[in-house]
Image (cartoon, grey):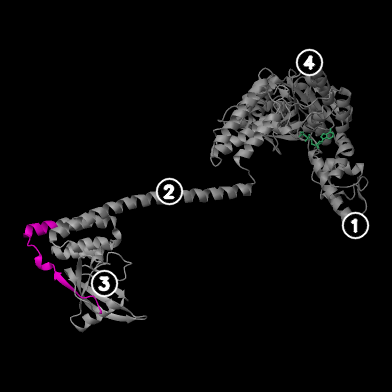
């Protein structure tokens, strides 16, 4: 080490000669000459092994440590030159020459300039070496004596002893200034370079570290998800591509996507998108098809096996299949089965698929509002997916499945595009061999798909779609038909579904009939099936718990299984009344009867309608009024009767949507009865639309309406003459015991309705 003037330092000494020197000094003025060795290793240095300039130091403290080591605290005082050793003694004894005496005198301005120069340089040095601290900075700023300033700086610089020696050897102030400033400037540069490199290295280390951690995390996540790395995935895709049955354009496109996939970082979101895309393309049945069974008698057998009744529907279905076999496939129209829920539409379609050995997929269109659900989202869209048609094809796995488009009438369009026109493109034989899904991007051939649609009501199907389809109507079942369906199909199905053997549960015919009439009220058999399921579940529990070996359901114990009866039919009024007439309505769950009430009271000629009335119904009420006014003379109605009275029409229990115009004659009859105070027969019901001139127009849903009338205990029904042929088609079972009167004019209706 090198000690500089003004520096206080302590160090340990162990060489006997040095210890002796300290002891000698302590006995005298406690002063000692310290000079630096050129080579640290030298144990016995001669004059040549030492620097020429050293320092006279004051010993401040001596501490004896163990092993003959002493520690001394010294303060450097004056520079001195080593002249030469003086003879052999126990310690090194030399002649020195003090240096400070030769100090030059500098003008004050020069001194001030030098002070400023060195202060500034040191501040710069501090800027890159902030560790030296604020305290020192303050001290430097306050010191104005050049020599003291330089000592202060020199003492505090963390530089090797060689540098300090150079400072020590610079005896004159100007020399020392040069040495010190040069040293500072070099240190500034070195530190700056060091800092810069350190920052770079740190940055690199940080980055490496971060990447390393992220990669490790990704690896873990991959492992958790059971994903392999990109390479092996790509290989898997290529293998699947080799096996794929598809044309060249498709294969090329997939190949291109796989190549792209290999080159994108597996951690990027694009990789996931591409992966999904490739997998979808590979799963699509491009040229894969199943072989159809063209045996019609087989088809007929299966249809009959699976369904009771539905003769007309089955016949139409078989005709359709025959035509399909004769003509080229793809050109046959699309079948649409229309009818109330639970009447076996879906189930017929499934049987057709079974009969033809076709794969069956069901696409539910109910509630679809966005065109993208049919045509897919573009790949750029977050979470993009193919549309339902392509998804259906994917799950079928062949290009020629039977695709059931369920509830086509429940589809609607909103601002996100026109669903109906997207579906048109799917169904149109002219263009569906090149159907474009936004996600898939490649044209897809739908021409070999056999589409069958279902709907509850024709009026809700968009017109252009309707034009493409051939309608087959599926009507409500009669109680007798329901009984047959339950006995021959539903009970067995529920037994199997609930793990019961044949014989473990029997339901008597009477019990079945009661379930149908008192526990369900529907056009189809869906609730009936549910009720049977409920019984089967309870029976299964009893059998399993060993309470019973066989469960027999009869009319008597039915309540135990299904609880209290739910429905009783709205029976006909017992007495004839004024202003109350029973109409027949057709609702989405089948037929129903509804009572129309009219009150006439003194007032200002106002006309009021309440209850669940559609616009069409309001208009037919108006038409009825006009008719009555036109015939008011015949019935002796005073001229200003309509000015002085208010008429109020009400339809109670009208919660179900009515088919619009079929209540025209009913309302007119009720109004006239109320006006002329003539009672209407209680056991008569009617349906038909009315014109201004009192002609009766035909209506729909006759089978359902007739059934409803019969269930309500009605004896006579008025039906428009123009519906005669529809009545002929209704089975005798329904018509039995009903007096059906065909009416052409309002007068015919009134003749039947009014009590004579
Ligand atoms: P929809 O599609 O018309 O709403 P489903 O086809 O779902 O009705 O029919 C409901 C249930 O009733 C199904 O389990 C079906 O098998 C059964 N079903 C309906 N009609 C018949 C029938 N004529 N013969 C046998 N089972 C029938």
Image position, residue 19 (x, y; %):
28, 79
Q: Nearer the viewer, residue 384 or 646?
A: 384
The quarter of the rendering in which ligand 1 is drawn is top right
**Splitting the image into 4 quarters, where does residue 459 fall?**
top right
What is the number of the mark on residue 327?
4
Q: Position of residue 557 (x, y in %)?
A: 89, 50
Magenta stretch? 90-114
Q: Nearer the viewer, mark 2 or mark 3?
A: 3
Q: CA distance from mark 1 to mark 3?
A: 104 Å
- First of labels 4, 3 by sequence position: 3
Q: Which residue is mark 1?
A: 547
Which callout, 2 or 4, points at the residue further toward the start of the chain?
2
Indicate if the residue with disc 2 has its beta carbon within 8 Å of ligand 1. no
Q: Nearer the viewer, residue 644 or 536?
A: 536
Name the mark on residue 326: none
The quadrant where residue 36 appears: bottom left
Element on which disc 1 rests: loop
Secondary structure at badge 4 equals: loop
Helix, strand, or loop for circle 2?
A: helix
Q: Which residue is mark 3?
A: 9
Q: Is residue 183 left or right of residue 530?
A: left
| Nearest to viewer (mark 4 / mark 3) | 3
Sooner in the amino-acid sequence: mark 1 or mark 4: 4
Q: Which residue is mark 2?
A: 204
Which residue is at a point 23% across and 63% down the rendered structure image?
Answer: 165
Give the Cα distance between marks 1 and 4.
Answer: 60 Å
Closer to us: mark 1 or mark 3?
Answer: 3
Residue 200 as seen in the image, left or right of residue 57: right
């Amino acid at each position: 080490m090198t000690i500089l003037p003004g520096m206080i330092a302590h160090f340990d000494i162990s060489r006997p000669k040095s210890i002796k020197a300290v002891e000698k000094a302590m006995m005298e003025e406690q002063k000692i000459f310290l000079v630096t060795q050129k080579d640290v290793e030298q144990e016995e240095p001669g004059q040549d092994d030492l620097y020429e300039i050293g320092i006279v130091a004051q010993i401040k403290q001596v501490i004896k440590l163990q092993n003959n080591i002493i520690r001394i605290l010294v303060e450097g005082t004056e520079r001195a030159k080593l002249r030469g050793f003086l003879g052999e003694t126990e310690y090194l004894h030399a002649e020195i020459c003090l240096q400070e005496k030769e100090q030059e005198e500098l003008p004050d301005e020069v001194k001030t300039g030098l002070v400023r120069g060195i202060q500034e340089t040191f501040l710069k040095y501090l800027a890159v070496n902030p560790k030296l601290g604020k305290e020192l900075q303050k001290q430097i700023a306050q010191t104005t004596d050049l020599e003291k300033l330089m000592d202060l700086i020199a003492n505090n610089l963390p530089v090797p002893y060689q540098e300090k020696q150079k400072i020590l050897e610079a005896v004159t102030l100007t020399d020392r200034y040069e040495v010190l400033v040069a040293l500072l400037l070099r240190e500034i540069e070195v530190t700056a370079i060091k800092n810069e490199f350190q920052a770079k290295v740190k940055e690199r280390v940080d980055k490496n570290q971060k990447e390393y951690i992220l990669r490790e995390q990704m690896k873990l996540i991959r492992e958790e998800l059971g994903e392999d790395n990109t390479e092996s995935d790509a290989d898997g895709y290529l293998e699947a591509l080799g096996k794929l049955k598809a044309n060249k354009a498709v294969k090329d496109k997939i190949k291109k996507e796989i190549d792209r996939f290999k080159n994108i970082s597996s951690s990027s979101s694009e990789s996931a998108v591409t992966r999904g895309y490739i997998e979808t393309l590979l799963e699509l049945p491009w040229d894969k098809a199943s072989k159809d069974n063209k045996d019609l008698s087989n088809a007929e057998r299966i249809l009959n096996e699976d369904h009771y009744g539905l003769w007309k529907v089955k016949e139409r279905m078989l005709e359709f299949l025959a035509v399909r076999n004769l003509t080229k496939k793809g050109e046959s129209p699309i079948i649409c089965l229309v009818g109330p829920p639970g009447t076996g539409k879906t189930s017929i379609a499934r049987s057709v698929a079974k009969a033809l050995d076709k794969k069956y997929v069901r696409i539910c269109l109910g509630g679809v509002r966005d065109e993208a659900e049919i045509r897919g989202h573009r790949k750029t869209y977050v979470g993009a997916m193919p549309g339902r048609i392509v998804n259906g094809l994917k799950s079928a796995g062949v290009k020629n499945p039977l695709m059931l488009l369920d509830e086509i009438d429940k589809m609607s369009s909103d601002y996100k595009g026109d669903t109906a026109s997207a579906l048109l493109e799917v169904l149109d034989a002219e263009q569906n061999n090149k159907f474009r899904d936004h996600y898939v991007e490649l044209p897809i051939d739908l021409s070999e798909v056999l589409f069958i649609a279902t709907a509850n009501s024709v009026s809700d199907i968009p017109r252009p779609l309707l034009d493409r389809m051939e309608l087959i109507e599926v009507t409500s079942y009669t109680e007798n038909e329901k009984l047959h369906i339950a006995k021959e199909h539903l009970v067995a199905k529920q037994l199997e579904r609930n793990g019961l053997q044949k014989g473990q549960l029997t339901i008597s015919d009477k019990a079945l009939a009661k379930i149908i009439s008192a526990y369900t009220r529907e056009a189809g058999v869906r609730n009936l099936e549910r009720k049977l399921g409920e019984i089967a579940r309870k029976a299964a529990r009893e059998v399993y718990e060993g309470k019973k070996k066989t469960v027999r359901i009869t009319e008597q114990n039915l309540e135990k299984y299904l609880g209290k009866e739910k429905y009783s039919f709205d029976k006909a009024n017992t007495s004839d009344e004024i202003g109350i007439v029973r109409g027949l309505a057709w609702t989405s769950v089948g037929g129903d009867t509804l009572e129309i009430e009219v009150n006439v009271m003194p007032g200002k000629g106002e006309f009021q309608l309440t209850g669940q009335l559609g616009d069409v119904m309001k208009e037919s009420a108006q038409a009825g009024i006009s008719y009555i006014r036109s015939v008011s003379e015949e019935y002796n109605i005073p001229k200003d009767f309509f000015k002085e009275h208010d008429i109020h029409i009400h339809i109670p229990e009208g919660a179900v949507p009515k088919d619009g115009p079929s209540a025209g004659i009913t309302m007119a009859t009720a109004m006239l009865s109320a006006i002329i105070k003539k009672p209407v027969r209680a056991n008569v019901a009617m349906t038909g639309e009315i014109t201004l001139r009192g002609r009766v127009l035909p209506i729909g849903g006759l089978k359902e309406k007739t059934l409803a009338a019969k269930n309500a205990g009605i004896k006579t029904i008025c039906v428009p003459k123009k519906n005669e042929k529809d009545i002929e088609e209704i089975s005798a079972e329904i018509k039995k015991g009903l007096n059906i009167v065909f009416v052409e004019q309002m007068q015919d209706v009134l003749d039947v309705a009014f009590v004579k």
